[in-house]
Every structure is written in structure tokens, then in C-alpha cells.
Amino acid sequence: MFNRWISSFMKHANTLPLFDVEKSNKAGGDPNIRYYHSYWRVAEGEALVIDSLPPMCDNWNFVLCNHWMESLDYRHRKVHVNKKMAAYAPDGSVQVVVSHKRPPIDGQKRRPVVWLDPCGHVCGVMTWRWIRPKVPDAELPQPRCSLTTFEAFCATLRG
């Protein structure tokens, strides 16, 4: 089952579409969670930038995993973010960046950024979850992903 899922995730790498709720529930997923699964690919010198405006919900989280949907090393590296850990812009939005080098985000004057470390992996599965969202599925915000160069992303931090 998971091998089929991963193959389907690879078809829309570096995007985060809403995972089929019925398929999730049949596989034992929590019916109170809306999952956004995909595959990520980030080479050295690139940055995957994910922007989202979380809805009202009990909690939310995003995690980087390896190809087999196993979480990366969360004990020693920053590979996930959740509602309480996130840095928010004044409008309530969140920006997550996945890159092999830590961008210069300390003391920045623009919107806050959450950096996640792919731990040397160049690809894997990523999951964003809204836990008990307070809006109907049709109104759930779509996390927006863009792949850019690391240098181009860092330039946005200076501007």
C-alpha cells in the first residue's frame, strides 16, 4: 500500500495536494485530520519554500520523512514544525524552507521563516496535517510550494 502511495506522491513532487480523505480513513487515518502528502526533492543549492495560512484548528504540523515515510532524525535535527513551534508573520501565515544549508534567518527584518533540515537526504515524503480544522474541507487553505535556488531564497531575506 505505502509503495503505491509513494509512487503516486512522486508524480506531484514539491507540491502538497490534499490527500484523499476516504483513502486515508480506509488506511486507518484519523477522520479528524486532513493530510497533505507528497514527495519532496531538494538538491544541494536548492530550497523548497512552503507558504501557508493555517486555518483555525486544534493543531497542525509538517514533517519531512525519508522515501519510506519514516520521519527523519527529529531527536537531533529540526525536521518538523507544529502550531506551537512555528514563527508566524503578522497575518498569521507561516513560511517553511527545506534546504541543505541553514539560511541566515536570525535577526531578519522580513517575515519569519522556519528552516527544516533534510539531514543529507535529497528526496523523501513530506506531510502537512490540519488537526480538527474548524472550516469545511472546501475552505481549507492549500499550502503553496515553490522550488528555488538557495541563493535566490536568501536574497529574499535581505530585501
Image: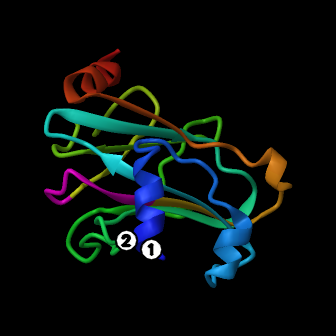
Between 28 and 2, the residue placed more toward the observer is: 2
Task: Identify the residue at horizontal 16%, vertical 43% (top origin).
Answer: 101
Label 1 sits on a secondary structure element that is: helix
Does the magenta portion include 55?
A: no
**Mark 2, residue position:** 69
Under mark 2, the amino acid is Met
Under mark 1, the amino acid is Phe
- Residue 80, how many percent across, how many down? 39, 63
Task: Identify the residue at horizontal 34%, vertical 66% (top origin).
Answer: 65
- Residue 58, how many percent across, how many down? 71, 69
**Mark 1, residue position:** 2
Decide: marks 1, 2 in contact (CB < 8 A)? Answer: yes
Residue 104 appearing in the image: no
Between 86 and 14, the residue placed more toward the observer is: 14
Of mark 1 and mark 2, the one earlier in the sequence is 1
Residue 82 in the figure: left or right of residue 138: left
Q: What stretch of residues is rendered in magenta?
A: 119-126
Task: Identify the residue at horizontal 64%, vertical 67% (top origin).
Answer: 59
Task: Identify the residue at horizontal 65%, vertical 72% (top origin).
Answer: 24
